[in-house]
Amino acid sequence: MRLSLEDQRQAGIDIVSDGEQTRQHFVTTFIENLSGVDFEKRETVRIRDRYDASVPTVVSEVSRQKPVFVEDARFLRQQTSQPIKWALPGPMTMIDTLYDNHYKSRERLAWEFAGILNQEARELEAVGVDIIQFDEPAFNVFFDEVNDWGIATLEKAIEGLRCETAVHICYGYGIKANTDWKKTLGSEWRQYEEFFPKLQKSKIDLISLECHNSHVPMDLIELIRGKKVMVGAIDVATNTIENPQEVADTLRKALQFIDADKLYPCTNCGMAPLSRRVARGKLSALGAGAEIVRRELSA
Ligand code: ZN
């Protein structure tokens, strides 16, 4: 984690994280630490309506007997005085990664996980985490559920928090199942449109959007006016390292729709599948591109 933090510092990143060093997988590492889920008992289910995978089974009431990432977050807090962000899976993405043989209701299980996430989030806040992010790629797939109870369960997960909260919804890493799916989405990816109006009214502070090399139209940002936006200016599905001018171009386009004080330059998604060399290069481009635009704005 120290090495990752140093990479982020050298790249000029302002809000830093554990660099995904404390988890194997963005959903299952959290679930592995809960009770009620049997990882030996596996069933094949369709993940995000896209690909089949063998997943663990919910066999009894789910609960969190002990903190999951709180000690890791405390360690990160001790290593830096910069603002820190911590990522947790979102309730809907969690249920979509399991076979439920107990509640037999996606919604009920999501509410249970939301309560558990809230316990974890409150303790992360207490050790000094500044921004807690929930990863909810499932939001780009199950629109009716998102509007019926998905956003509500997310709000349950952030209940009572005073730190900032973020939601990362995305079209996934560059793995084959995701890139094949993206080919079916058409020339404009407007899926965010289905639930942005409701998300705009939610208590979530920041919303992330992939803006570089994606087909997400920037004008969708109009639908979340008033929110802070994490603008993805780095493509995580390619090993090609962006140059700072490309990053700056993406940020300038986003500035047509977001006030500068609400724009948080970011990567499209996580960089876990990339090599360290590529990830460092991309982080540096992000830092340098943001610096170009910052200078233009203060000129
Ligand atoms: Zn993502």
Image: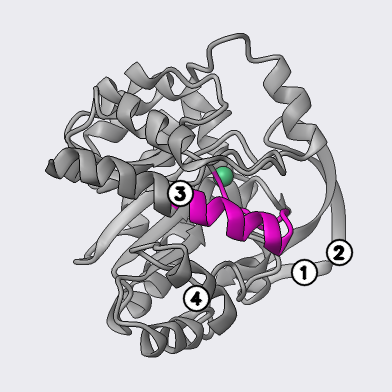
Query: Where residue 288 appears, x then y in whole percent?
Result: 41, 51
**In the image, what residue occupies the spot 70% across and 39% down?**
238
* Mark 4 burial class by Cα count in 10 Å: few <14, some 14-19, many 20+: some
- Of all residues, the one furthest to the left in this rendering is 299
Query: Where residue 30 appears, x then y in whole percent?
Result: 60, 69
Give the spatial CA distance, label 2 vs label 4.
37 Å
Residue 276 in magenta? yes
Where is mark 2, residue-wise?
41
Residue 200 occupies quadrant: top left
Q: Quadrant of the N terminus?
A: bottom right
Give the spatial CA distance, label 1 vs label 4.
34 Å
- Of all residues, the one furthest to the top in this rendering is 187
Give the mark, 2 or 4, whose residue is nearer the N terminus. Answer: 4
Where is mark 1, residue-wise?
38
* Mark 1 burial class by Cα count in 10 Å: few <14, some 14-19, many 20+: some
Give the mark, 1 or 4, whose residue is nearer the N terminus. Answer: 4
Task: Give the main secondary structure, helix, strand or loop, of the magenta stretch.
Answer: helix
Where is mark 4, residue-wise?
5
